[in-house]
Amino acid sequence: MPPKNSGRKAPKAERAVDNGAKADTAQDHATATAATVGEETKVKPDKKKKNSTNGTKSSVPSKRKANTSNEPSKVPRRSARGNPPATVDPIKILRFLLSPASLDICRPKDEIENIKERGADIKTYSSSTFTPFEELVCAVVLSRPISHALGLRSIRTLFNEPYEYTTPKKFREAGKEGIIQALNVARTQHRQKTAEELNMLADAIIESLGDGEDDTSLERVRKEADYDVNKEREMLQSNVKGLGKTGLDIFFRRTQGVWPESYPFVDPRTLSAIEKLGLPNDANELRKLLDHKWAGMTINDMKTDDDEEKRRKAFVRVLERAVGADLEGKVDVLKAEAEKLT
C-alpha cells in the first residue's frame, strides 16, 4: 500500500496517466451520458404499486417530488410501448445467469481486458466476494453519476495493488489526497467528491458504525438495529454522507446473501433488467422460482456449506448479472446464449 500522502506531488508516471487520460475521460463521459448515468437509473413510480421488496402497498404522489426517505425504492412503471423481446424459458435464463459462461456478457469490456493483463485473482465487482465494508465503498462509488464501466474501474483500482484500500484504516491512512490519487489512475469522474465521501465513510465506520479501524463486517450496525433492515438503512444513511436511496439499494441488493434480514430484495433498476430477461417481476416470485428449480441448478463456485446461504447468494448472482447485462446493453445477447442450453 502506498504510504500516507504527505502533500507531495504524485510521481511523474502517475501525473502522466492523469494528464494523458483526459481524452479517455472525455470518451467515458460521452459513454456515460449516452448510455447509463451511473450504476442505477432513476425510475418513475406508479401512484399505487406493490413494493418489490416486501409486497406492501405504497402511495406515491402524482407530482414528481424528491424522495428523501430511506425506505427501499418503489418499483418502476412498465411501458407497454415497443415490441417485447423474444421469449426464452425463464429456467434457461436462471441456469445461464448462474453459470460461468454468463459472466463476461455481464461485465464491461475493460474489466475483461484488465483480468487478462493482471490475472484472474484481482478483485472485481463482477466476480469477487467482498466484505460488507467493501460493499459499502462500492455503493458510495456507484452512487455517483458515472457510467457502469467507470464505476467498476474505480472499484478495481481502489481495491487492488498498489492501493489496496480495503479497510477503514487503510482509507483513513491514505487520506483524501491518497484516494484522489487512486481515482486519478482510474480515470474516473467526480474524483474530489468521491474521495471526500470515502474518507468520511472510513471515519464513520471507525467512530460509530464498526468495531475498530480494521472492522469490515459492519456487524455492529446489524446488532444496534436489532437485525431490522429498515433500521439498518436509517443507521447507514444517517452516518454515511453521500449514501442515499440508490446507494442503499445497491448495498442491500448485494449483501442480502449474508444479511438474511433483507432477503429477498430486488431494487427498481434491477427489476427492470430481470423483466427484460423474462423473469418474475417480484422479489418473492423470483425467489420461489429459484427454490422450485433449485435441484436442477449446478453451482460449484460458491464457498459455503450452508444451503440457505447458497440460495441467497445465487439469488444475488442472478440480480447482479441481470443488471450488468442490461447496463452493458447485452440483454439480447444473454437471452440468445441462454436459449442454446439443452
Image (tube, grey):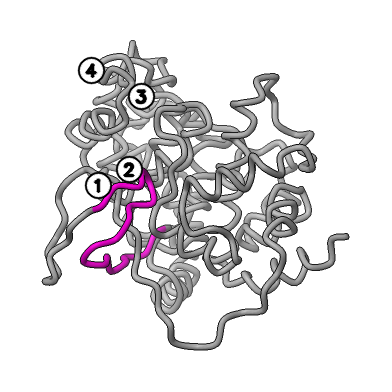
- Give the SS element for disc 4: helix
Which amino acid, mark 1?
A: Gly
Residue type beneath disc 3: Glu
Indicate whether 261 appears above or below 9: above
* SS for dot 1: loop
The residue to which callout 3 is attached is 173
The magenta stretch spans which residues? 40-57
Rendered view: 199 above or below 28: above
Q: Quadrant of residue 35?
A: bottom left
For residue 244, which numbered disc appears in the image?
1
Percent across and percent down for residue 216 are 43, 21
Mark number for residue 248?
2
- Asked whether disc 3 touches disc 2, contact meaning CB atoms under 8 Å apart, the reply is no
Q: Nearer the viewer, residue 117 or 151?
A: 151
Q: Position of residue 331 (x, y in %)?
A: 62, 70
Q: Is residue 159 visible?
A: yes
Q: Secondary structure at mark 3?
A: helix
Q: Within 10 angstroms of label 1, few (less than 14), some, or many (20 or more) residues?
A: many
User: Which circle's residue, 4 or 3, is located before the other in the chain?
Assistant: 3
